[in-house]
Image: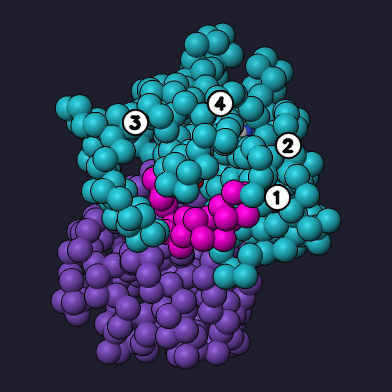
Chain colours: A cyan, B purple
């Protein structure tokens, strides 16, 4: 592994994962090992630990450092209107169905810093559905939820997001949704007022409501098969009959335990309807 | 005849597609070799690219999916915007973490993680390109016993990437896309 100055064996990774379960009750053992090993190495290198022993000692004895570990080990990369065809399908296929419901509950599992949630809020606002919607935004990493609450994203990204928005069928001037402050874009508070935040761990936590739409995008690619199946069962149980489940562009329900209970939308975007 | 490697990882950026088109017809299924190709490219041409490559080889060409087994006689192409990592159990993990060297997929990551699993049973090939992605990965792969090939910079449409590699890594073979005999010989037993 090419991270400079630090080394980490597979056994070291096992030790760390054990410690986290024993001391903090967080279980990462069902995560992709190749990814997690890389994240740990990156953290050790960024924080300039000189040895594995030193790193492990700190992690075991400093709960504040454990917080940092969770923040750094989880991958929080996200974008607004990422995958324009996906958002187009939400707009054209899914939202017209949800529009017929008296109240719309949506769950963003693994919402990261909230770009996906605000994209959804914009879609709902443009279809006059936001007032009767609730967007539950959850993540394992409490630090990202603070960012969702603030609704402030880097201004430098707005050009890209505006292009994505238009390509996904948006008709407005994207900049009407935020005010620029220095190098930040603060999104309109009316978009944020229907967002409900909570930490929720897909490894260990259960269902907490019934939803018409659940999005879990680019989260389960870090899970092994058994953990994916656990999360998918949880989503199945948390969906209303005929509710929708949306996954990331490289994720699928094919070959999973619950695939028989779902039907994919016609245009083959990564959205499935619960039919059983 | 079987290759003396189990996995070939090819990394390329600007100017590399034409070279890959010359190489993959040589990757006969009888070589018993799995191949991963990591290109820097735009999202839009995904399925077209797979078709173009599939027309040139008897191996099965597919876009890499998360948890794919690395099978002989298969060519896996990294999807746009995801890193491709190799797991100990010889499966693929797609990873959506930060760009590395301004690149996602990162050639470095694929070389490096493949070398950790395959060691001397891995061959790496770095082709034409305009940035320094791939060089660190080659260094690490070399340390782990992999066989290192780089396109001769003088034959590259965009020489920067292979040039960096040649300067920093001790390569086992420089390849010339118009004369791939040595490449094939090196892959074979
Ligand atoms: C790559 S981001 C995806 C963000 C957004 N859904 C998207 O597609 O752009 C992955 C998120 O999943 C979260 N995550 C990872 N493991 C989790 C778990 N066990 N339970 C809940 N969230 C988790 C991470 O903290 C991170 O914010």
- Whole-angstrom CA distance, mark 1 to mark 3, is 28 Å
Chain on which label 3 sits = A
Is A128 left, or right, of B73 in this rendering?
left
- Viewer-nearest of labels 4 and 3? 3
Can you tell me whether the CB of the residue at mark 1 lies under 8 Å from the nearest atom of ligand 1?
Answer: no
Q: Which residues are magenta?
A: A80-99
Q: Nearer the viewer, residue A207 or B20?
A: A207
How crowded pointer 4 is (Cα within 10 Å; few <14, some 14-19, many 20+) is rated as some
Q: Which mark sits nearer the N-terminus, 4 or 3?
A: 3
- The residue pinned by badge 2 equals A210
Q: Quadrant of residue A96?
A: bottom right
| Contact (Cβ within 8 Å) of mark 1 with mark 2 | yes
Residue linked to disc 1: A243
Is B39 included in the stretch rendered in magenta?
A: no
Residue beneath disc 3: A188
Given residues B144 and A12, the one toward you in this image is A12
> What residue would you read off at disc 4?
A196
Which sits earlier in the primary sequence, circle 1 or circle 3? Answer: 3
Mark 1–mark 2 Cα distance, whole angstroms, equals: 9 Å
Give me the residue at 62% from left, 40% from top: A104
Kindly check if marks 4 and 3 are in contact, taking CB atoms under 8 A apart as contact: no
Q: Tell me the CA gap for discs 4 and 3.
A: 16 Å
* Residue B120 image label: none
Q: Earlier in the sequence, mark 1 or mark 2?
A: 2
Q: Are marks 1 and 2 on the same chain?
A: yes
Q: What is the CA distance from the residue labelled 2 to the residue labelled 4? A: 14 Å
Tags 1 and 3 both on a single chain: yes
Question: Is tag 3's residue or tag 2's residue first in the polypeptide sequence?
Answer: 3
Q: Secondary structure at mark 1?
A: strand
Residue A210 at what x, y percent from top left? 73, 37
Point out the quarter of the image occupied by ligand 1.
top right
Q: Return the chain for callout 2.
A: A
């Amino acid at each position: 592994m090419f991270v400079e100055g630090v080394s980490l064996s597979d056994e070291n990774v096992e030790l760390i994962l054990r410690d986290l379960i024993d001391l903090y009750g967080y279980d990462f053992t069902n995560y992709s090992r190749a990814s997690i090993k890389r994240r740990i190495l990156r953290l050790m290198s960024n924080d300039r630990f000189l040895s594995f022993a030193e790193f492990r000692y700190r992690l075991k004895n400093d709960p504040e450092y454990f917080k940092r570990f969770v923040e750094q080990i989880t991958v929080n990369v996200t974008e607004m209107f990422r995958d324009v065809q996906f958002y187009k399908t939400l707009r054209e296929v899914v939202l017209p169905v949800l529009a017929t419901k008296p109240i719309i509950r949506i769950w963003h599992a693994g919402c990261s810093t909230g770009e996906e949630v605000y994209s959804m809020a914009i879609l709902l606002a443009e279809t006059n559905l936001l007032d009767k919607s609730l967007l539950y935004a959850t993540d394992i990493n409490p630090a990202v939820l603070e960012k969702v609450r603030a609704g402030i994203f880097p201004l430098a990204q707005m050009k890209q997001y505006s292009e994505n928005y238009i390509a996904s069928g948006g008709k407005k001037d994207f900049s009407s949704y935020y005010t620029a402050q220095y190098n930040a874009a603060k999104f309109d508070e009316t978009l944020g007022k229907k967002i409900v935040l909570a930490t929720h761990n897909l490894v260990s936590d259960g269902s907490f409501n019934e939803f018409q739409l659940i999005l879990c995008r680019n989260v389960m690619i870090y899970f092994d098969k058994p953990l994916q199946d656990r999360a998918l069962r949880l989503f199945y149980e948390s969906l209303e009959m005929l509710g929708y489940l949306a996954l990331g562009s490289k994720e699928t329900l094919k070959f999973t335990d619950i695939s028989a209970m779902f039907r994919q939308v016609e245009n083959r975007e990564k959205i499935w309807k619960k039919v059983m | 005849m079987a290759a003396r490697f189990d996995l070939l990882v090819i990394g390329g950026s600007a100017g590399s597609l034409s070279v890959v088109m010359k190489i993959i017809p040589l990757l006969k299924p009888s070589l018993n070799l799995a191949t991963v190709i990591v290109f820097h490219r735009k999202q839009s041409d995904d399925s077209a690219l797979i078709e173009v490559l599939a027309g040139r080889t008897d191996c099965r060409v597919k876009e890499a999916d998360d948890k794919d087994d690395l099978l002989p006689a298969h060519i896996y192409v990294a999807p746009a915007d995801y890193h491709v990592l190799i797991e100990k159990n010889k499966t693929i993990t797609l990873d959506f973490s930060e760009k590395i060297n301004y690149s996602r997929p990162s050639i470095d990551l694929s070389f490096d993680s493949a070398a950790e699993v395959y060691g001397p049973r891995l061959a790496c090939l770095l082709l034409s390109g305009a940035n320094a992605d791939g060089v660190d990965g080659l260094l690490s792969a070399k340390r782990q016993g992999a066989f290192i090939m780089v396109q001769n910079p003088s034959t590259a449409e965009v020489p920067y990437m292979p040039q960096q590699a040649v300067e920093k890594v001790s390569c086992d073979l420089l390849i010339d896309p118009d004369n791939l005999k040595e490449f094939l010989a090196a892959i074979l037993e």
